[in-house]
Image (spheres, rainbow, N blue to C red):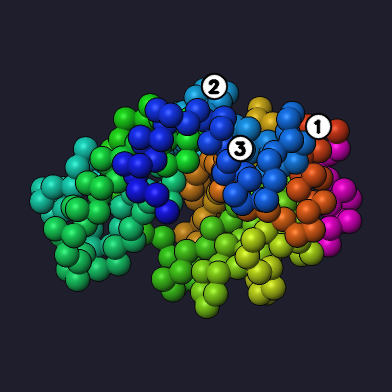
Amino acid sequence: MPSYALRKAACHVLPDRWFAMLMYLKHHGRLPRTPPVSFTERVAARLGSPEMARVQDYCDKRAVRDLVAPKIGANHLVPLHATADRLTRDVWDRLPDAFMMKPNHGSGWFRMVRDKSAEDFDALVALSDGWLSQNFYYIRRETQYRHIEPCLLFEKALFWDGGDRLVDYKFHCFHGKIAYIQVVMRTPHKSRLLFDADWNRLNVRNKYPNEAAFPRPPQLGEMRSIAETLSAGFDYVRVDLFNVPEGVFFAELTFTPDVGADGFDPMAFDDFLGALWAGTVEASVSEMAAWR
């Protein structure tokens, strides 16, 4: 993967739209259609677009807390221990033994600290300083991150079923309705399990295997209500939630998942999701039945 410095320099010679088209060609073996038709094409079309600049606060992991709390209740926010411009010894000393550390201005950057006494403080400073020194926009041209003022968040460590695995439920929503739910598993092998809104398994693969069994969560109804509440007003958004013994917690809103790089098998599912996005079909369980 090109270095951050190279990606940043490329922004001065390769316009966002060209970058998005070349990225799509690399991952799908063809250029995206114009205007976009499929889901992945529509995601790629969002890269560098002014439309995404308007959702900046929803992608700022600190600012979004104030936006979602009035809609779903502050009890669904992961408890926040502290925020800081930088990890210092003073901040470190005030943190509990276990916590999640992440920056507010990107995606995929996080570090779960399970036992503070076993951690190398200087190594965590270097890791977090690396996050803070980068503008996430330059990595994949996701405009929504470009002007977020970076900081660090230290949240309560959440664990699923008493273990150290945190399951992330990703609700893909079109026009305020859930089309499908994605559960990402990382052990023993990475997989993506796809279900419709009623937890029927979909016979669709999204880059990784869709084979492992996973139980229907008891709080599925509560999670669906939260996802549809938060997705209202957007033609497409992915609502990520955690479901742990303490309850259901908001994780983040994602508007350009995988920047449209990860395709579907069968490919027709990609066009079907594009039709949901366009509003020519509805995200109903009956419509999803064809993909079981």
Q: Which residues are magenta?
A: 281-292
Q: Do tag 3 and tag 2 residues touch (Cβ < 8 Å)?
A: no
The relative height of residue 12 versus residue 76 in the rendered view (above or below) is above
Number of residues whose C-alpha sits closer than 10 Å to that of mark 2, classed few (under 14), some (14–19) or many (20 or more): few
Q: Nearer the viewer, residue 88 or 96?
A: 88
Q: Could you tell me residue 172's position as x and y percent?
A: 67, 46
Say whether disc 1 or disc 2 marks the residue closer to the N-terminus: 2
Which residue is the site of mark 1? 279
Q: Residue at x 50, y 24 (%)?
A: 53
Question: At label 3, which amino acid type do we have?
Answer: Met
Badge nearest the viewer, 1 or 2 = 2
Q: Could you tell me residue 206's position as x and y percent?
A: 67, 59
Dividing the picture into quarters, in which one does residue 152 lie?
top left
Q: Quadrant of the C terminus?
A: bottom right
Badge nearest the viewer, 3 or 2 = 3
Tell me, yes or no, whether the highlighted magenta stretch contains residue 53: no
Which residue is the site of mark 2? 50
Q: Residue at x 39, y 40 (%)?
A: 7
Which residue is the site of mark 3? 21
Number of residues whose C-alpha sits closer than 10 Å to that of mark 3, classed few (under 14), some (14–19) or many (20 or more): some
Q: Residue at x 63, y 45 (%)?
A: 25
Q: Nearer the viewer, residue 254 or 130?
A: 130
What secondary structure is marked by label 3? helix
Horizontal side, residue 88 vs residue 98: left or right: left
Q: Residue at x 75, y 59 (%)?
A: 265
- Distance (Cα) linking label 3 and label 2: 17 Å
